[in-house]
Image (cartoon, rainbow, N blue to C red):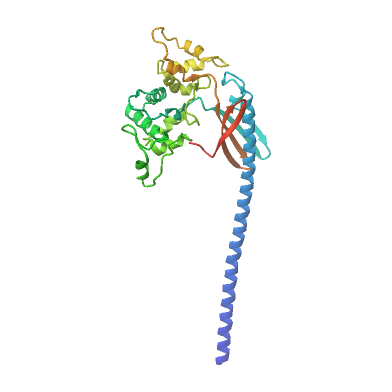
Amino acid sequence: MTRLNVQAQRQRGAALMMVLLIVAVMVVLAVGLVDGVRYSSQRLLNQRLMDQAYWYSLGGERIAVFALEDIAGETVVHLGQDWARKDIVFPIDGGSIAGLISDEQACFNINSLYKPEVSSGESTELTTAEQVFNGLLSNLEFSAQRAEFIVGRTQDWIDEDFSPEGIYGAEDLLYTAKDFPYLPPNSLIDSVSELALFAEFEEDEQSRLAPYICALPEANTVLNINTVSAAQAPLLAAAIGNVRSASELVALIEARPENGWPDVASFISELNLSAEEPLATVFIQGLGVNSHYFRGLSDVFYEQRQLHMYSRIVLRNGKAIVYAREYGEVF
């Protein structure tokens, strides 16, 4: 074989290798392009379906608003009213909307622990909110030391000053020294999930406490005795200074009139307290039969996708106003 023939074969081999390399590169690019197009298409589809689910959830929110505006003129809010139904499901094309409204005044408002700075010479006795919260923690088997710790940390978290108060107080210096530093807001708590930032919960403390507390945008609210459930009897017991045990109050709640107690006095009369030891006025002032703060859940199931939207609603001047929204699972 001549040198020219050998050189020609080598050139043909090199050309073949180049062609195969180009084909391989084109195949890789084509596969990547197809995957990118498929991914983008699926992402756009998911976005479109979730956007539709979001608009459906807003529709569910409007239904909650209308239901609450129906009771805006009522002097008594109770679980026998339409807003409190638990079986509300609306069918839609491709899925359904489930709705649930809960009373946010059937829990302990953690912001009621707010305590203005005490001037020298003023009384340092426990506030009513502190007494109720300590009573609740006692009923939930928290130690007195843990109760004092949580109360102290909470009050420093929401007060306006920058000076730690009490033996368990904490302000900027403590939180900025952490591995992931942050600052306390020095304002009312927006969500009870904030407690995880400063309460230093142990074991299952947070899960035990969560069903009984909430964070409302004002400090002075009352506990609605008509919407407290039997499962929340430890809270109601604490709200009356534990003059009756939680087990005793379970029976009282289960026997509650269908339309609720018309006033706080009717509830107190059923406690059968002795005339020598009446319920303290400070505890009576923390009870009520009406509510202004609610939370609505729109649970949308649409085209195999699910969206939870929680709407926080306040009743003001006959109108139901949505003042905050939360999405996903709320802890």
Quadrant in the rendering for residue 66: top right
Outermost left residue = 167
Residue 302 visible, this orientation:
no
Outermost front residue = 120
Outermost bottom residue = 2
Residue 173 drawn above or below residue 23: above
Q: Estimate the x, y position of residue 224 in percent, counting from the top left.
A: 51, 21
Residue 10 or 248: which is nearer the viewer? Answer: 248
Residue 39 or 198: which is nearer the viewer? Answer: 198
- The residue positioned 39% from the left and 25% from the top of the image is 130
Residue 280 or 104: which is nearer the viewer? Answer: 280
Looking at the rendered structure, the number of numbered marks drawn on it comes to 0
Outermost right residue = 93
Q: Quadrant of the N terminus?
A: bottom right
- The residue positioned 63% from the left and 44% from the top of the image is 51
Residue 155 visible, this orientation:
yes
Q: Estimate the x, y position of residue 122 in percent, counting from the top left.
A: 35, 24
Residue 124 drawn above or below residue 244: below
